[in-house]
Structures are given as C-alpha cells and as structure tokens.
Image (spheres, rainbow, N blue to C red):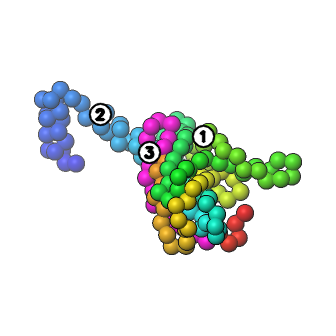
Amino acid sequence: MTAIASTSLRGIAAFLGVTLIPAIALSAQAATVTVRDVWVREAAAGRPTTAAFLILENKGDAVRALIRGTASVGDTLELHEMKRDNGMMRMSPVARIEIPAHGEVALRPGGLHLMIFGLKAPLTVGDTVALTLTFDDGKTLSLKAPVRAMQGMP
C-alpha cells in the first residue's frame, strides 16, 4: 500500500469513526493455522470409511486446536488416534487435536488422523476430496485433498 493510499484509508476510517486495526488483526489471525501435505487414503473396496492425513502448523503465540470437520465425500468426519495398547493397535476418537504455539502436529497413518465415515461413493486415486476444518477459535479452513493409494499403509 502506498503512503497516499494508506493516508486516504486512515482519513476515510476516521471520517466513518472506525479503526483499521481490527481488520488487520483479523487477517493476521486467520492465517495463524495453516495446512500442508493433505491427502485422503483410497477406500478399500466395499468399505464405507477412509482416513485423511495432513500437517497442521500454528504460527501464532497461543495453542490452537482442531475440534471438528466435514468431508464432501462422507456423512461424518471424526478426529481419531491410533495407539498401541497391550500389544494391540487401537483406534479411538479424540475430542480435539492441539497444535502447539509456533509448532506443528502431523496427522499420519498409525497416529492422529481424520476418519471419514459413510462414504457416498468409492474413492479412487486421482479423486479430490473437499475438507472443511474447524478450530477452537471458530475459524475454518477449506481444503482440497488428493486421493492416494493405500498400499504400504497400516
């Protein structure tokens, strides 16, 4: 923004009795959590479930948490984790996935992940799934996740 444009915006804001600071802060806050390496596992034949994986990065000063989401291809999306319990791997839902301040959390096969239930159609490699993630501060992120093969995964 040029100095003239900035001055003009401040003058307009002053005339309207508003400040530009909240808009700038809101914009910075919206970019606090970012997502990379998102993908969805190809669904096994005849199975109405699959999983999604990604990396959540928090660039902010406060801990954030993923609390729910939706998937365009399924009825329900749940936050899950896989843990070893008495020598057996067990999967269970979790209420939230925390993302440390200035840190990241990886949702990967065999650990934290997103489960998609009630697939509306079979998923094959090359398809794209729309995901919407909701965080504890009410912000949402919309993503497009490619479907990858399930070979070699737990």
* Amino acid residing under circle 3: Thr
Q: Residue at x 62, y 39 (%)?
A: 95
Question: Dot 1: what SS?
Answer: loop
Residue under label 1, please give it. Answer: 96
- Residue found 47% across the figure and 57% down from its top: 72
Numbered disc 2: secondary structure: helix
Say which of marks 1 and 2 sits in front.
1
- In the rendered image, residue 136 lying in the magenta stretch gets the answer yes
Residue 101 shows up from this direction: no
Report how far apart the C-alphas of labels 3 and 1 lie in the structure. Answer: 14 Å
Q: Position of residue 112 (x, y in %)?
A: 65, 51
Who's the residue at 60% across and 40% down the image?
96
**Residues in magenta?**
134-149
User: 3 and 53: which one is in front?
Assistant: 53
Q: Amino acid at mark 1?
A: Arg
Identify whether 68 is placed above or below 50.
above
Mark sitting on residue 21: 2
- Residue at the location (59% across, 68% down)? 42
**Is residue 19 highlighted in magenta?**
no
Q: Looking at the picture, how far across and down is residue 30, in whole percent?
A: 40, 43
Quick check: 13 left or right of 79? left
Quarter of the image that includes the C terminus: bottom right
Question: Between disc 1 and disc 2, whose residue precedes?
Answer: 2
Asked if residue 127 is positioned above or below residue 8 in the image, the reply reads: below
What is the quadrant of residue 110 in the picture? bottom right
Local crowd at mark 2 within 10 Å, few (<14), some, or many (≥20)? few
**How many neighbours does mark 1 have within 10 angstroms: few (below 14), some (14-19), or many (20 or more)?**
some
Disc 3 designates what residue? 140
Q: Secondary structure at mark 3?
A: strand
Q: Earlier in the sequence, mark 3 or mark 1?
A: 1
Q: Which mark is residue 26?
A: none
Please state which of the two labelled residues, at mark 3 or mark 2, is closer to the viewer.
Answer: 3
